[in-house]
Image: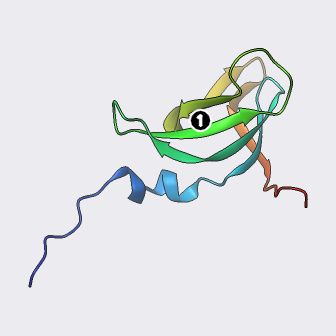
Amino acid sequence: MLSNPPTPTAESTPEIEAFRPGVYRHYKGNCYLALGIARADETDEPVVVYTRLYPREGLPMSTRRLRIWNESVMTDDGPVPRFTYLGHTTPAV
């Protein structure tokens, strides 16, 4: 039986393939643990699921569109990545 070739989806994009879960530093200095990538129900866009690594009021987990996560932002020193990968972490045993 012949099948149709797979339709390209968010799961197969180079941007998703390049994403690494782990600790990231935001360009303003705070650190976050990126847990992985999910799909936004409303838009089917890939989003990063992450939690902050500093105390703050409110819900602990957030999402951000992957394309925005990967953007550069303009600072006084010129363009810098919005988030910089610091390394992979594993839970302490």
| Residue at x-position 34% and y-position 30% | 42
Q: On the image, which quarter does residue 79 sit in?
A: top right
Q: On the image, which quarter does residue 54 sit in?
A: top right
Task: Check the picture and name the quadrant holding the N terminus.
Answer: bottom left
Residue closer to the observer: 26 or 51: 51
Residue closer to the observer: 92 or 39: 92
Measured along the vertical axis of the image, is residue 54 above or below residue 9? above
Residue closer to the observer: 80 or 55: 55
| Residue at x-position 90% and y-position 57% | 92
Measured along the vertical axis of the image, is residue 43 above or below residue 1? above
The x, y position of residue 84, in whole percent, is 74, 41
| Residue at x-position 59% and y-position 53% | 19
Q: Secondary structure at mark 1?
A: helix
**Residue bearing the label numbered 1:** 69
- Looking at the image, which residue sits at the far front? 93
The x, y position of residue 77, in whole percent, is 78, 23
Q: Residues within 10 Å of mark 1 (few under 14, many from 20)?
A: some
Taking 78 as reference, is 36 left or right? left
Q: On the image, which quarter does residue 12 sit in?
A: bottom left
Residue closer to the observer: 85 or 36: 36
Q: In the rendered structure, which amino acid carries the disc numbered 1?
A: Trp
